[in-house]
Image (tube, rainbow, N blue to C red):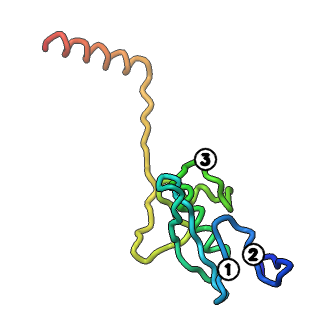
Amino acid sequence: MEGCRCLDDGSEETKYRGVRRRPSGKFAAEIRDSRRQSARMWLGTFDTAEEAARAYDRAAYIMRGHLAVLNFPGETHNYVRGGSSSSSSSQQPRQPQVIELEYLDDKVLQDLLIKDGKEKKKS
């Protein structure tokens, strides 16, 4: 199976950090929380090793930020600012943010500065 390698004793070990294969064939993901004396934090059971590895990556990024050791470091853009690689029916699609910039020449800027200076003197 992809994402796994067979050991000498016939069992399989995943190549992903924080992921292990259960006897049922599913993949379990967990992470150790260094803030709680390295207690294990259960992340869930997944059908594929890759899904479990991504769950680990999300949790690791939340806990450790850019210092996290990830299974898929090229996918950090999915974890920044709450992004997700999986879509949920409850999530609304994000609209692109539009920023309008207006160019003002030096004369207009000077006029604005002079006007602002006069208003401050009146106050």
Q: Quadrant of residue 6?
A: bottom right
Q: Point out the image quarter for the C terminus.
A: top left
Classify mark 1: residues with Cα within 10 Å, few (<14), some (14-19) or many (20+).
many
Q: Point out the image quarter for the N terminus.
A: bottom right
* Labels 1 & 2 near each other (Cβ < 8 A): yes
Residue found at x 32% / y 16%: 113
Q: Earlier in the sequence, mark 1 or mark 2?
A: 2
Element type where label 3 sits in the image:
helix
- According to the picture, the residue beneath numbered tag 1 turns out to be 21
In front: label 3 or label 1: 1
| Distance in Å between CA atoms under marks 1 and 2 | 7 Å
Residue lying at the far left in this picture: please name it. Answer: 123
Element type where label 1 sits in the image:
strand
Amino acid under disc 1: Arg
Image coords of residue 69 (percent x, y): 65, 54
Amino acid under disc 3: Leu
Amino acid under disc 2: Glu
Closer-to-camera residue (115/26): 26
Image coords of residue 87 (percent x, y): 50, 73
Q: Any mark on residue 113, and which?
A: none
Classify mark 3: residues with Cα within 10 Å, few (<14), some (14-19) or many (20+).
few
Image coords of residue 96 (percent x, y): 46, 56
Q: Earlier in the sequence, mark 2 or mark 3?
A: 2
Q: Is residue 58 above or below residue 64?
A: below
Q: Quadrant of residue 4?
A: bottom right
Residue lying at the far bottom in this picture: please name it. Answer: 24
Element type where label 2 sits in the image:
strand
- According to the picture, the residue beneath numbered tag 3 turns out to be 67
Closer-to-camera residue (93/59): 59
| Distance in Å between CA atoms under marks 3 and 1 | 26 Å
- According to the picture, the residue beneath numbered tag 2 turns out to be 13
